Amino acid sequence: MNKDLLIQKYLQGTLNEAEEQLFQEYIQNDPSFADDIPFYDDLKYAFAKADYDQTKAQLHSFYKEEKRSSWRKWSVAATLLILIGLSSVWYFNTIDSTESLYAQYFEPYKNVVQPIVRGEVSEDIKVLAFRAYDEQNYKEAIVYIETLLENKEEGILVLYKANAQLQLGETKEAIVTLESRIKKTDTIYAEAQWYLALSYLKLDNIEKTKSHLNTLLTTNSNFKHKEAQELLKSLE
């Protein structure tokens, strides 16, 4: 697969398993590939957030910053700018609008279950799970959380597992985790609706996003009510 496209799919969170493996191989074996990722991330953000003139200025800024790097970077950026000028349509229009909204509203659910004490040494699974979560070792956190869930199914643990999956870019897996294991009677039902809405937003499924936001607003919880209303308005 074309490396540029692979990076774009990584930033969109749409890599499949084979592409994820290829991506990791490039990261490990091709230093220039890893260097390109922040460039594309900044470029994507510029297209999503700025108008034409601002984007043009931002691209020239990228050029100055990257003048010692490969010519390919600037040529890709210039090509995108030409496409915009010719079509008056954002090249990344739909993807970037939902991606930028996702980035604006998503933040991982804070660890309120097992506060970690600095210097604490423990072999308790819950402590290990949430230490990994707080330290952003999300794959490790998922392993420990699954161990805890085998002993006792708790909605709050499911929520943290889904959050860890979202942080790893495993959006579809996070949806399955929440939809298959969270019930209306769970105390974190509203929270689950919020993260389901954001997950579908990242997948550009606007109808599902709206559905979960509206469900959230019908709950008795005040969790993210203001943000849900704002996001719904943005999607109109």
Image (tube, rainbow, N blue to C red):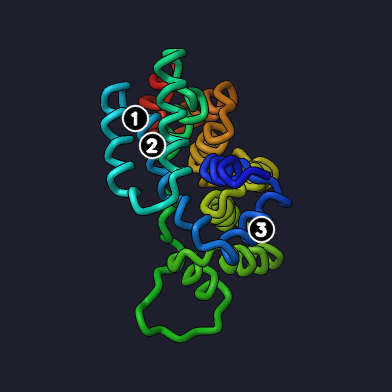
Do tag 3 and tag 1 residues touch (Cβ < 8 Å)? no
User: In terms of depth relative to the viewer, which is nearer, 152 or 159?
Assistant: 159
What's the mark number on residue 63?
A: none
User: In terms of depth relative to the viewer, which is nearer, 217 or 129?
Assistant: 129
Location of the N terminus by quadrant is top right
The residue wearing badge 3 is 153
For the residue carrying disc 1, how many other residues have a C-alpha within 10 Å: few (<14), some (14-19), or many (20+)? few
Please indicate whether residue 45 sits to the left or right of residue 23 in the image: left
- The structure residue drawn at horizontal position 54% and vertical position 29%, both measured from the top left corner, is 212
For the residue carrying disc 3, how many other residues have a C-alpha within 10 Å: few (<14), some (14-19), or many (20+)? few
The image quadrant that residue 58 belongs to is top left
What's the mark number on residue 49?
A: 1
Where residue 80 appears, as percent x and y from the top left, is: 45, 28
- Between the residue at mark 1 and the residue at mark 2, the CA separation in whole angstroms equals 6 Å
Label 1: state its secondary structure.
Answer: helix
Of the numbered discs 3 and 1, the one sitting upstream in the chain is 1
- The structure residue drawn at horizontal position 38% and vertical position 25%, both measured from the top left corner, is 229
The residue type indicated by label 1 comes to Lys
- Between the residue at mark 3 and the residue at mark 2, the CA separation in whole angstroms equals 39 Å
The image quadrant that residue 192 belongs to is top right
- Answer above or below: position of 153 versus 222: below
The residue wearing badge 2 is 45
